[in-house]
Image (spheres, rainbow, N blue to C red):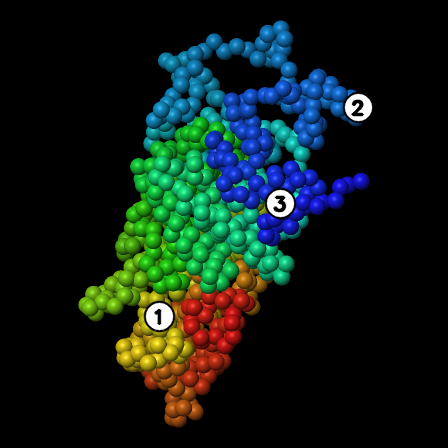
Amino acid sequence: MEQPRQHLCSVEGCGKAFSRKEHLSRHEKTHDPENILTCKVCAREFNRNDSLQRHLARHGDGFKQAPSGRSKRACIACRAGKIKCDGNDNCSTCLKKGIDCRYRTEDQAPDESGEQPQNETPNPMPKASMQIDEDPIMILEAPLEAPLEAPEILPLPFPMPATQPRQVPEGRSVSELAFKLSGPTGLVDWSSVKVLPDQLLNTPDKPVDPTSAQYLDIYFTYFHHRWPIFHRPSFEAEDDNTLVVSSAKMIGAWLLGSYEAKEFAVAHEALLEQLLPRLCKITSQDRLQQSLSLAFCQSALLNIIFALYYGKDSAISGAIMLRNILIATLREVEFFKKETAWVDEKPGYFVPMRLVKLGSRQRQVLPIRLDAMLTLFRLAAYLFKIDAYLSVLRDQPAVIFQEELHFSLPSAFGQYNADGLHIWEERQADEPPYRSQKSISKMITENSHEPIPGLEQPMLIEDIQTCICAMQPAIWKVCTPNECQVTAVLEKDSLRRQLNNLKAKLTLILSQFSENPEFGQEQYLPLQYYLGYEDSSQPGWQTAVVARVKSLLFDSMMFYHLSSLRIFAEVRKITNLARDRRLGPIEEVSTVHRQARELRLADMKTWGITPAARWSLCHAVDILVAHQHIAHHDGSLGLTVRTLDPISHIAVCTAALVVWVYCTLDIQGCEMCTPGSATFIELTRWSVPGAIYEKEKEAWIEDGNGSRIQLQGIQLCSCNVEYLIALFQGCLPVSWAIADSIAPGIFKCST
């Protein structure tokens, strides 16, 4: 009979119980951040020594713990059942069960005769070791003077399903397709290197929790393509109790949106309490991927992003603190210093040699850590992105400088998420070659200038987002009161042109969907850059790829409109004007505060009749129409308000704020407030893609035409402000409480 579990875990929210006290003590160590053990090879974290030792054995015999008095080997059956094995050729356990006793290759008993097996011939050739920066990267089994006479086949030490040989177009070599590099190819003729699939290993499957699997499926469907922070094949090899996996399940649960899932996500918000204290202990003597693990930084970044999806004001404040400490920590360990980067991280480094050095440095199975260095690039790129988001949300200057982004451009989404080296090899042939040869900072600088016709560089959607992020410090600065109005106008005009250049690139990509080209034949942005784990043998597999691209385009367009609003609309003054309606007793009697309120009101009335105000209205309407289009047309792709990127929610709130102030100030008024005859202009007609109404829109922006304006049949007036704001509120997720901070008091009830 099973003993009653009377020893309860004292950690709040855990609820686990054990029948023996020593089991409880062992379990409670998993909650203690101080009890973290780090793998000295790959920097993965464990909270139990036996788990660490089992993990170290995967890196090779050199990392195994010295054997104790028990058997030095165990058969496959005993190892799977985690029971003691006597190590005999036919162990006693297998004899009792009547099953075949087999051992892994590395556990096979050595030949007592000491003779070499007949199928292995000794190699008399000396081994030439090649080193770069005192890091051995390769052993060439060849005479030092003689060139390689035959192709060397590199077997892979990991399971890989068989794949059909890829067709190579006539006149092109495998190496030319795979890496697209010109000039010298280095010290090894990589055209002779072939990828061979290995035999599948007979390893027992881990038990799968269906609820956790559902959360992770939601994470990879709706979140991962927007924030591809970690390498998915590596992630799937992680244990379920790691910080990265817990953070991913937390986000997936929140996006699922059921009551139980949201309760699960909110309970995991306590992860933040584990991250902050440990980051505060990092010193300048620590190094990333050594005493500070990359997985820990990824978990911190995921928790910062989750706060924006969660939308609670206190969570946002905690995320801002975590962002500041994480960036300060990474600066302290010299992550952002170019001199700290590995040789193979620098732009233009030979790609195959990068992989060789990567395998040597990581001492890991190649496909699992294939993009470990590119994960560093992604950590920098997406920390830069969330830093820009928080800057917009709180109207604060960004923390990361563009000049710190010396990292190469991250690989395309499809390349980074290749499930196996055989798929990676196929997708590498189509990888944009410039991405390994250009830094993020250089890409931003190039796109800050007017493009030269015929010399425009191709860009992925993520690159356009990065460029818009890089503009936020300049936008924040130009919106700060400046004594020289002429300088401010010129700077705003320059920022407007930059944004329009980036929008033009997005419009070209969007036009592909109206042309309906055959998949893989797109002119401006090949959709194959956004392939994931889809099975191309299944009908309709392209739908997931199209949804991925459309959601990224939507996020980018919303970021463009939001940035334009920050330039044209006096968002800071409008926000303060909204706050003025619910003053505290001190502000009510303060003369200084009263004078500031009167000045703001006068400034906004003046602004309301300028072309900048009419431009702002057009951007606000575009944001509304785009969100309504998702609800009515893109629902089949799985695009819903809840799963949208938080920058879209911020854009909706800002757009609502602009419409609110235009109505509240009665810039034009309705027929009831200001009787008289006038023509009506429906603002949504200008949100139709194309140039059909472009001239009409520009004419109205320049002079106003004296026409009354309406939004979806509702005239913009203080009489109708509640109905108009309700249109925007319908585009926000339920209970996204931070909306009241962006647009104070304009939404009727808490969102």
Mark 1 vs mark 2, foreground winner is: 2
The residue carrying pointer 1 sits among few (fewer than 14), some (14 to 19) or many (20 or more) residues within 10 Å by Cα, namely many
Residue 280 position in % (x across, y down): 41, 46
Residue 26 position in % (x across, y down): 61, 38
Which is nearer the N-term, disc 2 or disc 3? 2
The residue carrying pointer 3 sits among few (fewer than 14), some (14 to 19) or many (20 or more) residues within 10 Å by Cα, namely few
Which secondary structure lies at badge 3?
Answer: loop
Which secondary structure lies at badge 2?
Answer: helix
Q: Which residue in the protein does label 2 denote?
A: 96
How far is mark 3 from mark 1, CA to CA?
Answer: 50 Å
- Which of the 4 quarters of the picture holds residue 66? top right
Which secondary structure lies at badge 1?
Answer: helix
Identity, as a three-letter code, of the amino acid under mark 1: Val
Q: Residue at x 61, y 48 (%)?
A: 10
How far is mark 2 from mark 3, CA to CA?
Answer: 46 Å
Q: Residue at x 53, y 64 (%)?
A: 641
Nearer to me, 39 or 2: 2
Q: Is residue 229 above or below residue 589?
A: above
Mark 2 vs mark 3, foreground winner is: 2
Q: Which residue in the protein does label 1 denote?
A: 571
Residue 109 seen in this snapshot: yes
Q: Which residue in the protein does label 3 denote?
A: 537
How far is mark 1 from mark 2, CA to CA?
Answer: 78 Å
Residue 341 seen in this snapshot: no
Q: Quadrant of the N terminus?
A: top right
